[in-house]
Amino acid sequence: MYFSFYGFVFFINIIFTFAIFTPTGRYFHSSVLVDRKLYFSGGIEFPSINSNKFFYLDVSKPFNITDDVSIPWVDLTSTSSPSKYQDTACIGGNNHDQIFVLGGLPYNQSFVIQFDSSKQLWINITSTVNVPTNRYDISCTNFNNGLIAIFSGYSSSSTIANDLWILNTLALSWSLSNGTNAPLSRFGYCAITLPNDNILYIGGSSPANLSVYMPMNNLPLYNTKSDAWTNMSISGPTPPVRRYFSAVLSMFANLTSSSRIFILDVSRKDYYKWITEFTPNTTISNNANPTSNINPANTISSSTNTVVSDFKNLGLIIGATIGGVIFLIFLVASCIVTIK
């Protein structure tokens, strides 16, 4: 009897070992990069399901986007991840291995939830003194080794001011900026920390009037060292106004149904410009052919990726076959023991 039970458990373990995790499509989720792992949290899954799924993509490994088996997704939903959407996430902590999920919906969860990526543990950060009001559709950005800034946002139950809050992820305390000339309140924008630790705010809409979009040729800049705001007048062909998009070094539209990519040149200290052309580093070979294979180390060829993918498929087949044979052996042996 015990023999049969152990065989059954062994077989179940084999099934889970060889199961492939592939996340479903979602929106209004948050993502952050920690130690070459791109983490994704929450969001809304089709058709309209508030998701608590938490997983990461290991971008240190090569993979092919047309082969689900080769994509190194890792599911961490079993860590009791929160069910949030329209939130934002940044890294912090002493070792830059802590994920802080801020704001979002629903309001009945902590405004700040921390994930320790080394211990794989979630922590609710509870504060009652000098904290921002509940809000969503914000974009956080980190700076100066452990500080995270959030600005304005949206709330269906109250009016959100044009306030900028700073979370010290080392002391787990909030402070409110006293900077003058702050820009108008906004939501659905993107915040980017520049190399000099200044924060640039792009796009968004007014929470007081959803039809009012923020201009793309005049962008607010927050100086984190002097706690002061300035407006950057941007030259070049200006992109259309927008909200609910993403931005890193470039940005792409979401609800505006556009596939165009816009590039903002911030290489000069006091002069930013929207550009339509980009010249890569001349040391990079121009003979490389576009491919759907993604290799972080740029050391594995397309043919090698194909071989690796075939090897993985073969490994799955062999593993599943061996597992099935072992299970049958255990099953037969347990039946003999039971009969005796």
Image (tube, rainbow, N blue to C red):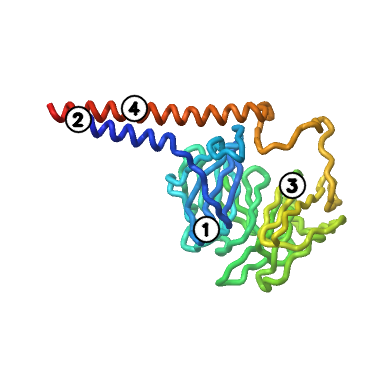
Mark 4 or 3: in front is 4
Mark 2 or 3: in front is 2
Q: Secondary structure at mark 4?
A: helix
Q: Which mark is residue 46?
A: 1
Q: Which mark is residue 325?
A: 4
Q: Which mark is residue 249?
A: 3
Tell me: 316 left or right of 144.
Answer: left
Please state which of residues 116 and 36 is positioned toward the viewer in this rendering: 36
- Sequence-first disc among 4 and 2: 4
Q: CA distance from mark 3 to mark 1?
A: 29 Å
Residue 118 location, x and y as percent?
50, 37
Find disc 2 in the rendering and name its residue: 335
Identify the image quadrant of the N terminus.
top left
- Sequence-first disc among 3 and 1: 1
Residue type at tag 2 = Cys
Residue type at tag 1 = Phe
CB within 8 Å, label 2 to label 3: no
Residue type at tag 4 = Val
CB within 8 Å, label 3 to label 1: no
Note whether residue 227 is visible: no
Please state which of residues 162 and 292 is positioned toward the viewer in this rendering: 292
Mark 1 or 4: in front is 4
Q: CA distance from mark 4 to mark 2?
A: 15 Å
Residue 240 location, x and y as percent?
78, 62
- Sequence-first disc among 1 and 2: 1
* Crowd around label 4: few <14 · some 14–19 · many ≥20 (10 Å): few
Q: CA distance from mark 2 to mark 3?
A: 64 Å
